Image (cartoon, grey):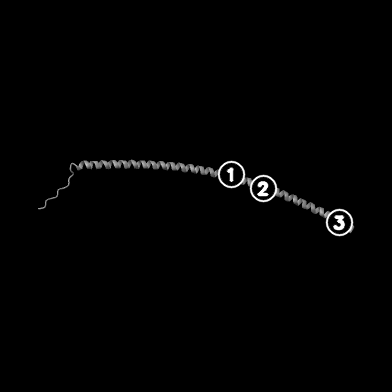
Amino acid sequence: MVEPTPQATPSDEDRPASGAAAHLLEMTARDADRWLSEAQSEAASLLDEARAEADQLLRDARAEAEQVTTSARDTAAEVVASAEAEAERVRAEVAELQRLATENREFLRRHLTGLLEQVTGSSPDDDD
């Protein structure tokens, strides 16, 4: 006949070891939960800091862009005003040159008419 194998039953010596293991697992779980909570808190804090820094960078960039835009507009207005003044100066110079050209034509016409009268001995109005 075969004798049944005895079932392993926890002995009195194994019970404190299982309690210690359970206690160790419980402590490890508590530590893991605490570390997880600390990591989540730190991550949230870092995220808040990053958002605040990004907001500040955005405000700074917008302010700088506004300053550059204003400066560019001012420079453009100065260039336009200068160009308009130069154009007006050139128009005045052209008008003066046209006046001088007309004056010189009239002078040459009178001079040539006088020379012609001297050559022909009569005035152009005498042809009638």
What whole-number distance in Å separates the C-alpha atoms at marks 2 and 1? 20 Å
92 relative to 110 in the view: left or right: left
Crowdedness near tag 2: few (<14), some (14–19) or many (≥20) residues, C-alpha within 10 Å: few
Q: Residue at 39% across / 41% down in the picture?
A: 42
116 relative to 16 in the view: left or right: right
Amino acid tagged 3: Leu
Residue 9, compared with residue 120, is above or below; it is: above
The residue pinned by badge 2 equals 84
In this rendering, the label closer to the viewer, 2 or 1: 1
| Residue 10, numbered circle | none
Secondary element at image label 1: helix
Secondary element at image label 2: helix
Task: Please tell me which of labels 2 and 3 falls first in the chain.
Answer: 2
The residue pinned by badge 3 equals 115
Residue 107 coordinates in the image, percent (x, y) = 82, 53
Residue 57 coordinates in the image, percent (x, y) = 49, 43
Residue 104 coordinates in the image, percent (x, y) = 79, 53
